[in-house]
Amino acid sequence: MRQKNEHIHTTKLLTYLLIGIVGVLGLVCLYYGSSFAPGSRRYDDHGSRLDGSDPVFGEFSRNPDLVDFLDEQGYYLEVPKSIPVCDMKYSELIPCLDRGLIYQLKLKPNLTVMEHYERHCPPPERRYNCLIPPPKGYKIPIRWPASRDEVWKANIPHTHLAEEKSDQHWMVVDGEKIKFPGGGTHFHYGADKYIVGLAQMLKFPGDKLHNGGHIRNVLDVGCGVASFGAYLLHYDIIAMSLAPNDVHENQIQFALERGIPSTLGVLGTKRLPYPSRSFELAHCSRCRIDWLQRDGILLLELDRLLRPGGYFAYSSPEAYEQDPENRKIWNAMYSLLKRMCWRVVAKRGQTVIWSKPLSNSCYLKRDPGTLPPLCSSSNDPDASWNVSMKACITPYSARMHKERWSGLLPWPKRLTAAPPRLEEIGVSSEEFHEDTKIWHFRVIEYWKQMKSVMHKNSIRNVMDMNSNLGGFAAALKDKDVWVMNVASVKMSARLKIIYDRGLIGTVHDWCEAFSTYPRTYDLLHAWAVFSEIEEHGCSPEDLLIEMDRILRPDGFVIIRDKHSIINYIQKFITALRWDGWLSEVEPRTDALSGGEERVLIVRKKLWTDGYTTM
């Protein structure tokens, strides 16, 4: 009898075990089956993608609910042990600014208005699902502040600018290094002297352009290698140095390698991805922009971006040459800006400085029908992601009327003071200060985690991929770094608070590639970014590869997100070669915590040899 009972018991156990195995296999089949559903990535008999793109993550169309369930049950799905490396010809790939893609997709951009320099992202089936290799001989970048004046030639092996601009002292090749004397097209003898000259023209105290902290945010269009922005840092002025990926195609790459705040962009047909009233000063030194085209639409874009009373410093032949052609351009530009209610506040040598009005009173005194017109009340001046420029003047709201610099305190007080525009986004000053306090503590904890592996000045270029109110960047104020604050399209209204704090940033959709060169940031901070793109149905694997593209070797990634997402990302660390160092902790819960969070910090390895390109 006893043997019979034992036999029955054993049979039941085997039955339950078989049922369990069948259940798990069914779930796994469901998971992988989604990869072959209609519209998913397809393969031929040899494992090649039928759509012509790379197969790296084709089999990982993840069902997030299923992944969470399997993680909870202890079942870990297979992930690639390695990710292929792209061909060396893609070592400087910028996916959404790839002009080769324009020709491949047979797009027809309007070259006269610079559409070919604007973003054109590849469709999902044409994304590069491989790791971008560094160029041959790549070295860990020279650290700030020495990097302001010199970089490794092997890291950006392009010397044509040194040859083309040799008489203007942009850059000089010196053995294994490229050096930057600080010159520019209109300041051959150094940006430092040029900056003092601008302050003298404006009669600022002590010949200091910061004007007691009232000049903090500057937009430098057509910036070259960003030497103007580099020397502004001495005055606690931060410039968004902007240039397109044009015939001088590596100028922004040099700027970022130097550790200078800068980004790729162009005054074309779309608004720049910044909110209205963000800058105290706009600057153009021989930027070769046709300011008169399309009814002055590019000057009207600067008008949107300047704060009340903001300045436009313009150094160009039209400002001083007396030949008929330049006189004609100057007279037309002067007439346009006068109708925009701007006035000349200083003119000396090669440079003229205009000032934007403080109030709406001049606009209201214009004759009926005067062009350019005022924008309609339905126009949102802060909408900037993929929004076409408008040839109209943005009037001030009643609250901003007659308030120079939008009523902001001078730097550095404005960094921690609650800005007036908080009420526009429905945030109280108490919530703002609480946010600042929380991020101060969070950053202290991050740095404690990284203390054992972080060397002095090893971090310079920082990106906060979900900036919210700018608390993360504000907490780094005592460190010698600069932060590119990125606001999602959904939260883009909050970017104005970033600028009102004296910080800089941009709007971006992380379902697409960012407009920067490979290997340009030392630290990426991703708070709840993966949770957000998951809600939009975008691929976390694509985002991981994009983060790897823009991260420098030896750079750090801080990911703060849900427990299940951290678990999933960890499975890709070795394949991404982010296993130079790793730390994972469960942080203290605070008012910003979205349920159970984990903090994962990893470090990217420097790899130059021993890989096979695709």
Image: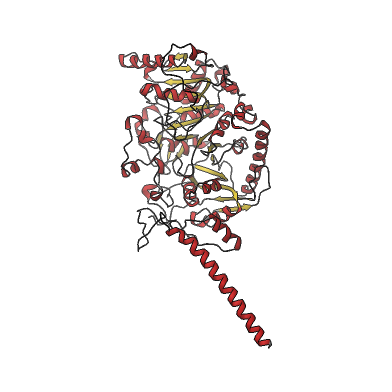
Give how far across and how far down residue 132 sits, in percent. Answer: 43, 49
Taking the view exactly as shown, the residue that stands out farthest to the bottom is: 1
Residue drawn at the location 69% of the way across and 87% of the way down? 2
Give how far across and how far down residue 206 sits, in percent. Answer: 57, 18
60 lies above or below 487: below
Which quadrant would the N terminus be assigned to in this image? bottom right
Colour basis:
secondary structure
Give how far across and how far down residue 264 sits, in percent. Answer: 43, 35
Residue 194 in sight in this render: yes
Give how far across and how far down residue 471 sits, in percent. Answer: 62, 37
Kindly indicate the quadrant of the structure image that contains residue 269. Answer: top left
Residue 188 in sight in this render: no
- Along the line of sight, which residue is nearer the eye, 497 or 237? 497
| Side (left or right) of 466 relative to 35 | right
311 lies above or below 514: above
- Along the line of sight, which residue is nearer the eye, 346 or 432? 432
Total numbered labels placed on residues in the image: 0
Which quadrant would the C terminus be assigned to in this image? bottom left
Residue drawn at the location 64% of the way across and 51% of the way down? 596
Residue drawn at the location 37% of the way across and 51% of the way down? 87
